[in-house]
Structures are given as structure tokens and as C-alpha cells.
Image: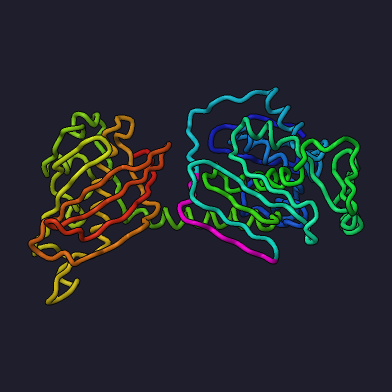
Amino acid sequence: MRLRPAPPGTGICFRRVDLEGQPVIEARVENVVDTNRSTTLGKGSVRIHTVEHILAAFSGAGIDNAHVDLDAGEPPVADGSAREYTRLIDEAGAIAQGEPQDPLTVAEPIEFQSGETLMAVFPHDRLKISCTSADRHNRYTQFRSLEITPETWRRELAPARTFCFFEEIEFLIKNGLIKGGSLENAVVIRDDAVLTTEPLRYADEFVRHKILDILGDLSLVGRPVLGHVVAVRPSHAANVEVARQILQQARRSLGASAAFVPPAAPSKGSGDLGVADGGTLDIDQVLRVLPHRYPFLMVDRITRIEGNRIVGMKNVTANEPYFAGHFPGHPIMPGVLQLEAMAQVAGILMLKQAENAGKLAYFMSAESVKWRRPVRPGDVLVIDVELTKWRGKIGRARGVCRVGEDIVSEAEVTFMLQGG
């Protein structure tokens, strides 16, 4: 196996240099063709088996782009862990490339269950994996929870070796799955005995290796994942299915993003637009900040900007186009447009940070949404938004809409900034 640098946007690609044409298979979940005991990638008749350990090494070390050249159908097994791969990556060194890699943030809980395997992923601002490992007889039940960083990867996970139970070996041999297997590259459990050529590297080495496998399989998403993965008796099949569901959730969010904010600023700095503490914006300034126009502009002026809080106002007139059909004879401002108003006001607040000028904010999720009373023609909607969390390109805000002293709607919204 030979590891080579790759330009930005390449991802991790495997190349079979022993085959005619040297076919390439990208390490993406759509190329997974088998998950029996390991993860196999394939295109046409070409296969690359047991990719999870080298993929975990790349992911743990923070490597986004690399070529992997192989002269056989799987990477060298080494000692059954990812320690040797990690050593080679560290010796080669890594460089920051010109294009930033946007993480994929899990916005809503994901759950998958198959037999005794349970996998769930919850929103989290980093990648965290909590895993319970056990066989069907509950032997060697172990639990470990780790936030994955390059440091915890090298210290806590990379040296953990693969393992199997003695009664599985005959099946594996008959199916050609452990042709190079030995006690030098795997730990074998027989009844209450642990068979290995060296002592266990950790008291809970088995569950650590399960976390290693999860990390490698999740990297098939193609981008760093931010979320808390909770796994009980995980398998490669379950890991890959969760990776698929994470991608599906992200694609649904992007598909819905056109209905949200995008606060696109002109190229000049945010201070030039009055988006600063103590500032107010009239309608002309709002139009210079937001790209929205009739009939989708949901804020007429900004009356207060202070710290992480902003207050906007929308005059709800009888001329609003949606009143014609919502509802004839009983006009009511749709609740989703109140949510949109919160989002647009939150987008303006983000322009306080000069580095966000010219970017777009795409809706990812809305939680704790409540509509308390109708908003009718003649009402003045006051939109009060507070930015509650911000990490990287992901923001979270709480919005409240009022008419007079009455709260008419409220919600918590999460969004991601992208370059405009």
C-alpha cells in the first residue's frame, strides 16, 4: 500500500495498481457493496476489502484528501489495528489546503436498529462516540465514550486491535475472510480466555476497536461529521446504514434551504451597513443587507442591535399577497412566514462579524416551534432574536414574535453559513 497526497476536494480514493487500467474507487457510502465482517467498496467487478482501518486512520488524523494505491484486494493487515497506518501518516506529515472542509452537522436525532444492534446519532458540536460492545452471550461487555480528536485518536483508539470469538473462525476461514489472520494481527476470545501474542493494550481494547470501526465507516460520508453517536453492539452494516442516513438528512436540509434566510451582504464590511451594536436599520439599509424582495421580505426595519440580540419589525398590511388565499374572509399571516421573519432577522445579526459579509445562511432545523395566536392585517410584528450558540459555520438562535405585549410565535432555529 502506498499513500499519496491529493488536491482539495478529492476525498479518499483507492486505486488498484495491480489491475488493468488501475481503476479507482472513491471512499463514499454509495460505493459500499458488502459489510459482512468488514466494509468492502466496489465498482463493477473491482473490489477493495477491509477499508475501515485505513479510513479511520485518515479520519482520526484529520486527513480529508489522499490517494491510496494498492497492489491487492485489501490494505495490509499490519497488527490488526490502525497504529501502523497512523505512524506512517504522522511521519509523512500533513498540510492545510486552500479550501476549507465544511463539516456535516447532524441536526436531528437519527436511529437505526437491527436485531440486537442499536445505533443512534444526536446533535453535538463535535464528533463523539459512545459504544457498548458485547457478543450475543454478553461476554466481555465493555463501554467507552470518547470525543474524537487527533490526540484521542492516537492515544486511545489507533492501537486497538481487531478481535473475534473462537467459534467464528471456522466460518471466517470457509468464507475466505481471514486468509492472513493470525494471533499477530488479531485477538481471539475462547470461552473466558483471551488468546494473543502480547498482552491486551487496553483493558477495554475490544470496545475501543469497535469505536475505531465506527469512525472508519462514518468517514464514508465524505465530510467530517459532527454529532454524538451512541452504539450498542455495532456492526459494519449498521455503521454504514447510519452513514447513509446522515447523508440523507443533510440532503433534505439542503433541499429545504431555499425557503430560509439567505443573508447575503454586499462586498463592503458590515460596519458600513450599520450592522453594529447600537445601530438601527431602515428599509433602505435592510434591502442593502438582505437579498430578499417582494413578496418574501419579512422585515421592514431593525430597531435594536445589542450584543447577541437583535429586534426587527414587520408591518403586516392588508396588501400582503398571501392573505388572498390564507384565508378568504379570515386573513391570517402563515406561521411559517413568522418563522421566516425570525430567520431573516437572525441573518442580519450574523453580519456583525466582518468575516461573514457576503455569505448565505441556510436553514438546517427548527425546534420548539409554537404559534400562540393569529397575526392579522394591521398588526405590527416585533421579531426579537438572540444568537444562543455559534461554532464554526453553524449558528443557533432563539426567536420570539410579539404583537403588542402578546407572544404570537417562538422557535429555536439552526443554520449554516456558506460562502456567497
The structure residue drawn at horizontal position 71% and vertical position 43%, both measured from the top left corner, is: 208
Give 213 or 91, whichever is nearer the viewer. 213
Image quadrant occupied by the C terminus? top left
Residue 42 can be seen, yes or no: yes
Q: Position of residue 1 (x, y in %)?
A: 77, 34
Q: Position of residue 412 (x, y in %)?
A: 34, 52
Say whether residue 229 is left or right of residue 403.
right
Which residues make up the magenta segment?
104-115
Give 266 or 137, whichever is nearer the viewer. 137
Magenta-colored stretch includes residue 391: no
Residue 25 can be seen, yes or no: no
> What's the coloring here?
rainbow
Compared with residue 66, is residue 313 higher up or lower down, i.e. above or below?
Answer: below
The structure residue drawn at horizontal position 56% and vertical position 60%, both measured from the top left corner, is: 111
Say whether residue 36 is left or right of residue 167.
left
The structure residue drawn at horizontal position 71% and vertical position 39%, both measured from the top left corner, is: 54
Compared with residue 90, is residue 329 higher up or lower down, i.e. above or below?
Answer: below
Q: Residue furthest bottom?
A: 329
> Residue 315 sits in which quadrant?
bottom left
Q: Position of residue 81 (x, y in %)?
A: 77, 38
The structure residue drawn at horizontal position 91% and vertical position 37%, both measured from the top left corner, is: 197
Say whether residue 45 is left or right of residue 288.
right
Q: Position of residue 266 (x, y in %)?
A: 24, 35
Q: How many marks?
A: 0
Say whether residue 108 is left or right of residue 399.
right
